[in-house]
Amino acid sequence: MRRDPLQIPTVVLLVLAMAAWWHGADFYVHEVLLSEIALFAMLAMSLDLLVGYAGMVSLGHAAFLGIGAYVTAGLTVFLGWPVALAMPASALVAGLAALVVGSFVVRLGGVFFIMITLAIGQMVYAYFLKAREFGADDGMSGIPRLDLSFLGLDTADPAVFSAVLLLAALAVYLLLRVVVRSPYGATLVAIHQNEGRVRALGCPVHRYKLGAYVLAAAIAGLAGSLTTQHSSFVSPDLAFWTVSGEVLIMVILGGGGSIVGAAIGACAFLVLKHWLSAGESWEALGLPTFMADHWQLVMGSLFVLVVLVAADGIYGRARRLLRRDGPQAG
Amino acid sequence: MLRATALTKSFGSLAVTAGVDLALPAGERHGLIGPNGAGKTTLFNLLSGELRPDSGQVLLDGVDVTHAPSDVRARAGLGRSFQRNNLFPDLTVRENLVIGVAIERGVTRVWWRGLHRDRAVVADAERQAAALGLGEELDTPVRHLSYGTQRQLEIGLALVRRPKVLLLDEPTSGMSPEETHAMLALIRGLPSALTLLIIEHDMDVIFEVADRITVLDYGRVLLEGTPEQVRASAEVRDRYLGLDEGLTP
Amino acid sequence: MLLDPQFLVIQVLNGLQLSALLFLLAVGLSVVFGLMNFINLAHGTLYMLGAYFAVAVAGAFDSFWAALVLAPLGVAVVGAVAHVTLFRRLQSAGPMKQVLVTFGLIFVGFDVVRIVWGRLPHTVPTPETLAGSVQILGETYPTYRLFIIGVGLAVLVALHLGLDRTRLGAVVRAGVDDRTMVAALGINVELVFFAVFCLGCWLAGLAGVVAAPVFSVFPGMDMSVLILALIVVVLGGPGSLWGAALGALVIGMADTFGQVMFPAFASVTIYALMAAILLFKPGGLVPVRPSH
């Protein structure tokens, strides 16, 4: 609802930066860094709808990533479905799973919501870890990528597929921006601020929160489908709590409640993670190279620091600085 | 229009509402008074659906809403304000009212186009702000408003749905004499068809507004009658009015 | 198989042993949650630290008993430092930020133990006095596992007496009931909360120490146990000693029997149980506060 003059320039800049990076990228950057950024940006932006707008801090978002990944894996490998059909099916099944789970959990507020989403995420992980039909802890492999040969594109080419992923992330961004700027999105913000009053005004708030939960899960399911196409492999680790945690860190790091902040958070997190897990980076700092194995320590500390001193994250901080100088001060 | 029968609610072993009966015909202005802790706000919460009664019944316009949550009751025509300001503190005055209007018009389900496109909603919200005397404050975040102004918005939000029954919980509490005066004018200006139940500590306001008054004490109805009857009651005088400086006959 | 009494007894004892550990972990979480509406997601990390401290102390002094005394104290100190430097500063910002900070600390704790103790599992030898086994219905059962059950029971009794008979206990009970009232009585609530928090950390450390000789000590041992402890808290109802005990018993038994009888569905069943409780009895099995 609030005007956000920084939003459009930031997005344009981000898109241009990604395009330039993609254009000049080598095999590794296409295959790993850009693809991961796109996939996690999708996840983080969808989680921002819950955390930053509806005020539902979920620690189990990776559950829907896992569900989406396994649906695509199962449909393509076991049933021979074309990927183009498996992708919407992944989003649909993840959304349906969220509909079932959500009808229970959206009633819970605050800390209880954190606990139950964490537990549900681990439940999905535990299920896939034991599920023999899906390869248990070995997972499954041989998942094909989306066939775009009718466009003359070969998605086996890392440059092509990373472009597909980046465009998918852009599409997710545009969809979520439409949603958060709509009357529905404004209602989510109001529910976040004062759920009881929104209900007293005649709005069935549980259904609205459920809607956001389902949409976020469907996007995570789509991201899961793309993740498994990207790696041609799926394992229970996709649904593990650390993945949910990393996505939440990205949202908080980038700044919740703006969508673009979550994408920035995903970029910053992954660039930093790749930099920290390289021995040379530590060597350059004059620190022992074994630290490259312990990037989680730095990430965890950084996250604690952000929560402590800069809770509005990178984008939120930038926006506040701008507002302080601008005419809208006060 | 609003009827409660044998409403009971206990917290632990403490009966906060003990068999309260209440009947408000359409258009009645009804005052609810009683000492602190008499269970006035709890009764409001039972009537509006924030709380569920242990036993008893709530009828709204002849429909049993005893088990309906507050959003259903709101859609059935019940509006309420809260004792403590219960707004959206980080949103502006306009945004607060836009949310109310959008919910009332059922446009909050719209997710595919920007809220700013719904000009009618925004215009309606601005009109209501002007009617509340908040036309100058449209772009002020609510937390920056003075307490009295927030209080006005509190009532304004309760009125957004044009309710059939309105519950006002101490609308003038914490207000300056001028603000109280303005609030009184606002209450007097409410449509005559509206059924009003009002909790108020300011006896001047109650005796000015109410057609009938219910006195609550320890969760029970002590007396129900016209302002004259309440004023004349020795029991009420002893239990409540005599202790309260608000009484200026 | 189910009707075989030997099998049953052994599984019940295994269940009790897990219940005792879960109780030690959950009771601190639960009472802190009841008092401050703050859940420490790094509570499992404290359990892991307790186990690693036990590795260090038992190695240095060649004595399990030294570890049993010193390691929980070390964990309590870590908890106290975290409380003073981090959580207290966030008190005014509300529980959500505090929970997020504790979540970040899980990552930190995980890598700290990997840096200090490496990624390979460690073991702590069972103390000699408890290394034997006892005969129960013709089955041999390790004495040490009975010791774990005993520790759980002893802590339960001690906490019950402490809550019931001491002034601090009375303040804690009142604080779970109604914070503002306790503050109004002029009691230093902050200090009481701090003491309770440290006691909770100490208990988590204790759980880590007594668990160390039975389970291997490895980075990541914190998470599975954290989730179970959270479920116990939810199940028992925040702030309730007997709720934590009952919840620990239910989850300890359900997990033990579930793993033996339907391994594929055991964990799923427990999560479903938690969801059902949250939905139908949101105050938990032994609610402290009247439900609304």
Image: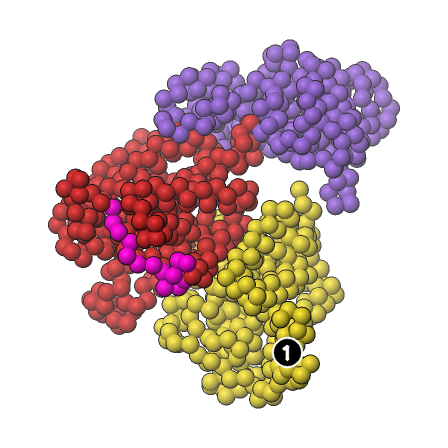
Chain colours: A red, B purple, C yellow
In this view of the protein, which residue sits in the foreground, A219 or C122? A219
The percent position of residue C127, horizontal first and vertical second, equals: 56, 86
Residue sitting at the far front: A79
In this view of the protein, which residue sits in the foreground, A330 or C221? C221
Residue at the (51%, 15%) spot, across then down = B131
Res A180 → quadrant = top left
**Quadrant into which the N terminus of chain B falls:** top right
Q: Which residues are magenta?
A: A133-146
The percent position of residue C92, horizontal first and vertical second, equals: 51, 49
Judge whether residue A184 can be spotted in this image: yes
Judge whether residue B207 can be spotted in this image: no
Q: Which residue is mark 1?
A: C146
SS for tag 1? helix
C161 on left or right of A144: right
Q: Read off the chain for label 1.
A: C
The percent position of residue B175, horizontal first and vertical second, equals: 60, 26
- Crowding around mark 1 (Cα neighbors within 10 Å: few <14, some 14 to 19, many 20+) is some
Q: Is residue A263 magenta?
A: no
